[in-house]
Image (cartoon, coloured by chain):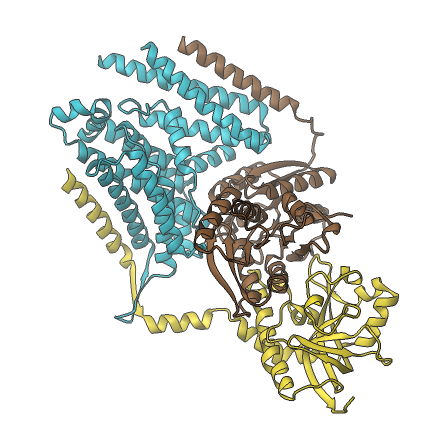
Amino acid sequence: MKRRHLLYLIGIVSLGFLLGGSLEFRRLDDKRAEERAARFSPAEYARDFWDNRLVAEMDSPQAVDELIRLFNTDMKGAIAKGRTLGESRVHTYLLQGTGRIVAVDKDGLLLSVLPEHTDPHVVIRTGAYIPGNAVRDASGLIDVSAFSDTMKFNRISAEINRIVVQEVITPFLDRQPQVGMNVRFIGAAEVAEDATERIPFGGRERHEGSDGPWHLLKIVPIQLEVEQAVAG
Amino acid sequence: MANKLLVSVVAVLCAALLAVGCSRKEQPQGQKRIAVVVSTLNNPWFVVLKDAAKTCAEELGYRADVFDSQNSPSVEAGHFDTIIDGRYAAILFNPTDAEGSIASVKRAKDAGIPTFCMDREISAGDVAVSQIISDNFSGCVALGEYFVGRVGDKGTYVELLGLLGDNNTRNRSDGFHSVVDNYPGLRMVAQQSADFDRTKAMEVMESILQAHPNINAVFCGNDAMAMGAYRALIAAGKEKKVMVFGFDGANDVINEIRAGTIAATGMQFPKTMARMAAEYADQYLKGKKDLPQKVPVAVELVTAENIDKYIAYGRSQ
Amino acid sequence: MLDQKNYRMLLAKAHSLIALLLMVVAFSLLADGFLSPDNFWTVMRQISVNLCLSVGMTLVILTGGIDLSVGSILALSGAIMAGLLRRGTELEVLNLHIGYGVPAAVAIGLFVGASLGWFNGLMVTRFRVPPFIATLAMLTIARGLTKLYTGGEAITGLGEVFVRTGSGRWLGIPNQFWIAAGITLAAVVLLRKTRLGRYVYAVGGNEEAAKLSGLNVARVKRTVYVISGMLAAVGGLIVTSRLNSATPIAGEGLELDSIAAVVIGGTSLSGGRGSVLGTVLGALIIGVLNSGLVIMGVDPFWQQVIKGFVILLAVVADKLHSREA
């Protein structure tokens, strides 16, 4: 009986193998090459976005000092000027401006951008790592609905942030920015609606040398250059 | 005797069914029905989502029936059969699996029934009319930043994962690590699954504490596990030394944050998502067809500093 | 003697049949749209997976055993079918990639199911592990293997042919119903007309007597576990092709549904007494109950309570009746 059952099983399996020449043999290398070509690459997507699509937006950023003024006078109006992803109380802005470096630490520059050089200053993120989705969302160029899997959308953001670190922040830091230097920037910022009371997602406590008012804007730089090196 | 018993028992059962049937509100004729399909009701979070979806649909003038998929894509597929047969007008859908649920939604679409996803997504761009999804990844990025701010850039921590194979487990963990892994001084000494379950989290945490008594923090993929881990820390007398981070915004964790014991959680908005899905369904049925395919709903960081603004599962105002 | 046995089984079936009919009548009155051709086929589709598992479970329970691992075996064999179809096998050394067509993938999946069942049987017979423990262990092992194999994620995009296997129709009738019906029929024939069928009853009725009369009890037991494992793999085929994806959590809790179907169908948990047709009635009762309660819009929490009571009732009725006999 036992042998008979074993025979049944072997019969079924071999039948399976016979049916329709069900197996297909290929070189593994070919298969892998094909897969690589078909796979979605967030790095490549981010590259294309950075090189080709983002530049087109570079003539439209808002002036940072005007936005700050608007936030102080007309919160709703300021919010309306930003972009919002889905249902959220975080709004993103594409900004440009110039300012003088007030402080430098490992996570960012404190920049005075208002003509009178008073608070609120802004922070330009120059850390070794950029969190968040500021660049992706502020540009408004990448639509979440275009991605069947939202994780792809998230990975693109991480890749864009990596490009920022490698191609904007690192070269800038090589110029050894000092307090007192003037810089010109284009960048993206996320502002939470609760920001008037408190920045919800940490940050202030960690930023040394900034016991003044909180920093409304933490800007992820897209272009960042030293305008002139003036002491003091 | 057995026959008599059986007959009487069946009679009682029928009577009970009749009673249940009659006790239901009489529905006006021709009222449209909306199906609320929820992945599981074993977790209070999903009960909140379900209740909100049902209430909103009823407020909009529909009759709403609830289907519990018990975390199984095949039970869910069965529910979709019933829904299609029953000619429901729309489906408010919390999928069990990003891939496994696609086939069901597609069948509903082919039968002319629109589906609106809540909280979890399906990995297909053109079968559901709209997907209102919780932005788990970005929420955990924020949580990760706060984690680094509180723990510092040196220390050891433990991660408790949710159900393996669940998309949210992965998205939350990925989001958290996309931040924390940038700090080489922060070392994860253990990463274990506790299935989103409070009791299991407590047990797993107890074992981990045997091997790693001197950790600085524990990050949990949901609040139930955060509560379990916190219990284990209390039992070991370490609740003051180890910071606990959760995710969801559940009642007891909100209370703990208010009491200053648990460090932070990511607030999801089940009621907001359910309401949006119900409203989208209503608009769609009334002829508005250009609804966005995906609407991420932001997850907000809740800490001792901003706890006043939050209640369980939402904002206080 | 034989007459009395037949009479008793008839009575047990009559119980279930009456209950089923009453339920259908009650739901037809209460649940709008319950009594429709569409819903009939929906119920049939819904019970087909449970039926596959329950038929195997009936054989195992008839021998006095139990198989808690069916849900996990379903998941693993489904995942293997999906994995073979989607990823194939990579032989690094030979620089060779093997792609699988549907027949090969399905055959290997079924073979895996049967093998795990065989392992269950081996533990029970050779190492005298109680069936409850042996299959409980397999429940965990196979679930863990499934998660390892899938990497915790769904394997998806399995191709039109495979999807049609489980969710297509033939002669207007859903394929999964054909499969389940075929299996049921085969099991009825097996139990009624073959020597193995008589042995199954003999082993469950009185194992010592069967042993003394020269029956190879161990072989019979191993066979029923192999069948149960393989039928679980058939369930895996249906579920996976229906969803066009294999999920690592597929089939969780299905072992309980199938035990419920067997018990409601009047098969005694102590073995030796019961029938496949009873199990079919049991599966139908669960299916009708599920469908009816859902269509009526009964609160899901209440549904669970009601289902639990139905199982209790079935067993109570069965107990009273066997005491009487």
Residue B143 visible in the shown view: yes
Which chain comes out yellow in the rendered image? A
Across and down, in percent, residue C287 comes to 46, 31
Which residue is found at the position 68% from the left and 56% from the top? B300
Which residue is found at the position 12% from the left and 24% from the top? C212
Foreground residue, A159 or C241? A159
- Looking at the rendering, in which quadrant would you find the C terminus of chain C? top left
Foreground residue, C166 or C318? C318
Across and down, in percent, residue B83 comes to 57, 39
Foreground residue, C22 or A151? A151
Occupied quadrant, residue B21: top right
Across and down, in percent, residue B192 comes to 46, 53
Tell me: C106 left or right of A18.
right
Across and down, in percent, residue A172 comes to 65, 85
Colour applied to chain C? cyan
B167 is higher (above) or lower (below) than B35: below
**Residue lying farthest to the front in this orientation:** B237
Which residue is found at the position 69% from the left and 40% from the top? B57
Q: How many numbered marks are there?
A: 0
Colour applied to chain B? brown
